[in-house]
Amino acid sequence: MTIFSSLVRAGLVGLLAVQIVGTANAQADFEGIWTPQHPPRMGQPDPATVRLTPAGQVEFEAFSPEKDPTLRCLMPGIPLGLVDPYPIEIVQQDHQILILYEHFHQVRRIFMDGREAPDHWLPSLIGYSTGHWEGETLVIRTTHLSPDNYMWTAGYPFSGDENTYVIERWSRDGDILSFTGEVHDPIYYEEPYVVNGQWSFAPDGEIWEYECIPEFGGIELPEE
Amino acid sequence: MNMIKPGITLACTLLLSGLPAVAHHSGAAYFELDVDIEHTNATVVSYDIVNPHGRLAYTFTDEDGNEVEWSGELASANNLRRRGLGGEIFKPGDQLALVVGNPSRSGANFSRLTRVEFANGDIAQLTGRNTGITRADAE
C-alpha cells in the first residue's frame, strides 16, 4: 500500500466517521422566546377519541376541581402543563435543555448527556426528563410523575402510577415550534393520551412574572 | 334586573376555540357555559388583577329592589394585561350598563365573566379571540 492510498483510505474513514457523528449529533435551534399558537381545544384530543379504562372512567366521573394544582397556585407540571396559553423560553446547553414557562414560573430540565434518573428521585409534578436528538427532532421522555395531578381540564385523570411516562417529540419548521406528546397511563387510559402544542418564534417576546394568589383560584364548588 | 338567558352562546364557541385568553382550566367544570346571566345598571366594587384569575366585584339592584353583590372570574392577570385589560380599566364606582357571564354551578353569586358594557359605551370583551377593550369614542 502506497502512502497515497493510505492517506486516501484514512481520509475516507475520517469522512465516514464525521458523517456518523454528525447524524447522531444533529439538532435544531430552539433557543429563544416562543409565543403560544396552540391548536383548537388547547391542543387536547377530541373527547370522543379518548378511551378511558374502567378505573379511569370512575376517576373521570369523580373529578373535583380540587385536583387542579394551579388553582392552589402550584405549577401544573406534567402532563397538565404540557400546553399553556403563555410564552415559553428555551435555553439549549450542552448537557441540558431548559424550558422556562411563564406559567407559574415552571422550569423543566431536559438532560441531554445520557444520564438516567437517580434512585433517590421522588415522584413530582415536573418529573424527571431526559432527551435525545433524532435528526432535528428532540425526543423527551419524562418519568417520576406525581399522582397529585390530572391530565387535562374537564376531569381527565392521571394516575401517577410508577409506570406512567410521557414521550414528547419537538420540531421546528421556520418560525413555528411544535410538539406532540404521548402520555402513557395504562391505569386510566386504554391508549396513550395525545396532546399537541405549537408556538411561534417571538424574538421580541417577554416572559413576565406570574405571581399567584390561591384565594383567586376561582373555584366555587358545587353545593353538596 | 336579573335575567338568565339560556342557549348556545358565544361562551360555548370560545370554550371550544382554546384561545390564549381562556382560563387554563376548563370552565365547564365550574360554570354553566351554555347559560348567560345578565346584570344591568351595576356599580364596580373592586377589580383584582391577579393570577391565576382576575376578579371583578360589582353590585346591582335586583327585581325585588334589593342591592346584591356578585363577582366574576376573569382571565389571569398576565393575559388581562397582554390584552390591554390591566391597570384601571375598572375602578370602584364605575357604572356598568351590562355585565354578562356564565353562572357558577355552585349557585353562589359568582360567574365566569364574558363581556361588560360600560355606561359610557365602552365594551370590555373578556374571553375569546377578541378579548380587549373597545372604546366608544374610537368608533
Image: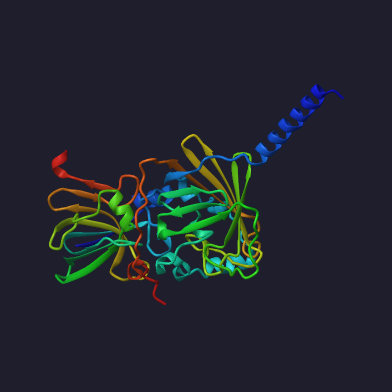
Q: Nearer the viewer, residue A31 or A71?
A: A31
User: Residue at 56% of width from left, 48% of height from top?
Assistant: A94
Q: Nearer the viewer, residue A111 or A75?
A: A111
User: Residue at 48% of width from left, 38% of height from top?
Assistant: A176
Report if residue A36 is visible in the image.
Answer: no
**The N terminus of chain A - image quarter:** top right
Q: Position of residue A81 (x, y in %)?
A: 48, 57
Does A13 sit left or right of B39 as displayed?
Answer: right
**The C terminus of chain A - image quarter:** bottom left
Q: Residue furthest right?
A: A1
Q: Residue furthest front?
A: A3
Q: Position of residue B64 (x, y in %)?
A: 17, 70
Report if residue B67 is visible in the image.
Answer: yes
Question: Which image quadrant for residue A134?
Answer: top right
Does B9 sit left or right of A84 as displayed?
Answer: left
User: Residue at 53% of width from left, 39% of height from top?
Assistant: A172
Does B17 sit left or right of A61 as displayed?
Answer: left
